[in-house]
Amino acid sequence: MSLDPVQVMSGQVKGLKVGPSSNGDSRGSWEEKEDQDNVGLATKPKPVTGRRTRKVEGGVFFPKPENAVTVAVSSRVLFRTEREQKVFEQDGVEEYLRFQIEHENEPFTPGPAFPFVKALEAVNCRLRELYPQSEELFDIVLVTYNHAHVGIRLINTINHHNLFIERFCMTGGSSPIGYLKAWQTNLYLSADADKVREALSEGIAAATMFTSEKVTEVSESQLRVAFDGDAVLFSDESERIFKAHGLDKFFEHERDNEDTLLDHGPLKGFLEALGKLQKKFYAKGQRLDCPIRTYLVTARSAASSGIRALKTLRAWGLEIDEALFLAGAPKGPMLEKIRPHIYFDDQMFHVEGAAEMGTVAAHVPYGIAQKHNAKQNSSVRK
């Protein structure tokens, strides 16, 4: 199975698709209608029952953005909204808003980012047990292009699924990137590839998530995050050599620069943030029982080009729990064994291979591979 990135981004590929645009990150959904407040409801919403009190030991607690590891998640990747998309496409924005309010006591079903968010919350529970007064926690912000009218349904859904998400950004069609910077966001996950690229251009770690028909069961007690190396944790310097001059020149370049550190890539900061929280568990003697585990899954060869990657991580003071150098072998089978909550890669065919094996994979649209894919698509169209 080989995916055309244009088809992928437009949701045309069976089995792997971008979340629907009506309940999240497509500005086009809202541009055509300026008067969004005049919903004209004929049906009075039913009263909400069974709300829970959101407390932690010692009371309700919200970390300051400067102390927390902030993960901003689009409503389109946290939940699934295909039915709402059909209403929007067939009947327009006003009927869509009316539909959302009339169904606001019906929770959305979990989307591809849902297990990842649950795992973040599981880590927070462990951190609060060890450090009751610490603000060094994961802080989850729900980001949506939706009108505020849809907020009630989102809140009801969050309560239904027992999620601890108190911070919302409902932008009504405006770009959320400025808000992400204000939140000091460490990671942004969205179904909108354009907004992900915009976030990356502003120095925010970001990735595009997709909905896959096959989903592998993941751990409920240990957060597992897997990273590609080049153009994800590291810059695309070495990948540029490979794309321009081939594998032999790439190996030669890596040998000649074995003691020269690679520059940082867009997800380095998020790995640093994970490492910072890991060390809090290590300090309490829980290295072997740490609820965070990280993986490097790279197409690099170990003997021919692995030393430079490992030396770079060591010089940065970063620990990777497991490193898999696959020497060009498919990543999907390895990821199936790891069962990460999320895997980050800059190349769509690796995202595709992971999805085929049931792994939730996120595309980081950064580096030379994006231009290479664009050229391929252009050639196909010609």
Image (tube, rainbow, N blue to C red):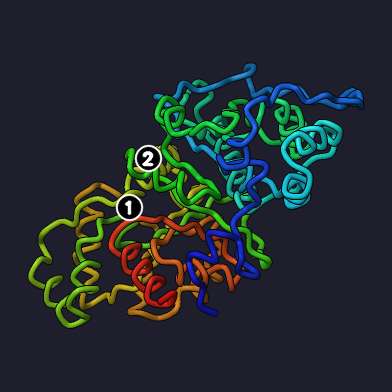
Instruction: Tell me, yes or no, whether the two marked residues, 1 and 2, touch with CB atoms within 8 Å.
Output: no
**Closest to the observer, 332 or 287:** 332
Which corner quadrant of the image does residue 310 belong to? Answer: bottom left
Numbered circle sitting on residue 204: 2
Q: Position of residue 273 (x, y in %)?
A: 38, 40
* Label 1 vs label 2, nearer the camera: 2
Relative to 189, is 167 above or below? above
Residue 122 in view (yes/no):
no
Q: Which element is circle 1 on? A: loop
In this rendering, the answer to whether 201 lies above or below 350 is above
Q: Which mark is residue 213?
A: none
Q: Nearer the viewer, residue 293 or 93?
A: 93
User: What amino acid type is highlighted by mark number 2?
Assistant: Ile
Give 345 or 100, whichever is nearer the viewer. 100
Q: Which residue is mark 1?
A: 319
Residue for point 55% across, 30% down: 128
Q: Which residue is most to the top?
A: 59
- Label 2: which secondary element: loop
Work out whether residue 193 or residue 239 is closer to the camera in this orientation and state it.
193
Label 2 crowd (10 A; few <14 / some 14-19 / many >=20): many
Q: Where residue 35 sits in the image (x, y, percent)?
A: 67, 24
The kind of residue on which mark 1 rests is: Glu
Tell me residue 146's x, y (percent).
64, 33
Left or right, 155 with reference to 184: right
Quadrant where the C terminus sits is: bottom left
Q: Residue furthest left?
A: 256
